[in-house]
Amino acid sequence: MDLVWSEVVTQIIGFILAVWILHKFAWKPILGLLDSRRRGIENAQQEIKEQREEVAGQKAHYEQELRNIEARARERIQEAVREANDIAARIREQAQEERRQRLSRAEDEVARIQESATEEVRRQTVNLAVAAAEKTIREHLDDERHRKLIREFIDKVETAS
């Protein structure tokens, strides 16, 4: 194989001419396309990064909100428990007060009944004593002695009560 120099030179000139034409007319658009694509990818990556940061910020915000809601819920539960305990204490106090009042009324009623019974016993005792004294006086005593005995008996009853 013989080397044909005219073909080699023609091919070299054609190659150089093709490279020059590509450089002159196509190189800048191709580089522009590649550069544009590179910028698009970089922008997309930047947007993804920003979105991730935004999502992370929102996540932190929502987690904080959730903690706040849980804290408020715990506070409300504790407040409800405190209120229930207060109500229970008031109910116990009211029940004790009512029990004390009933006991006091019962004691007062017993004292009143006892006093009434004592008074009734005194009256009956006086009536019996008067009747006995009257009978005795009619049988054995004169009027003066009768009055003296009654006074003595009344004095004894008064000192006994």
Image (spheres, helix red, strand yellow):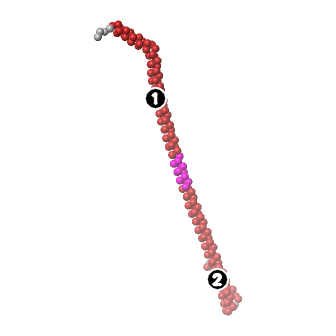
Which residue appears at 54% of the width and 49% of the height? 76
- Residue 148 shows in the view: no
Label the magenta part by its dominant secondary structure.
helix
- C-alpha distance separating marks 2 and 1: 117 Å
Q: Which residues are magenta?
A: 72-84
Tell which of 107 and 77 is nearer to you: 77
Q: Nearer the viewer, residue 10 or 110?
A: 10
Q: Which residue is mark 2?
A: 125
Element class at badge 2: helix
Above-or-below relation of 57 to 11: below
User: Where's residue 72, x and y in %?
Assistant: 53, 46
Query: Which percent across, then down, holds residue 84?
Result: 55, 55
The residue beneath circle 1 is 45
| x, y percent for residue 62 | 51, 40
Q: Residue furthest top?
A: 6
Q: For the C terminus, give its image quadrant.
A: bottom right
Q: Nearer the viewer, mark 2 or mark 1?
A: 1
Q: Secondary structure at mark 1?
A: helix
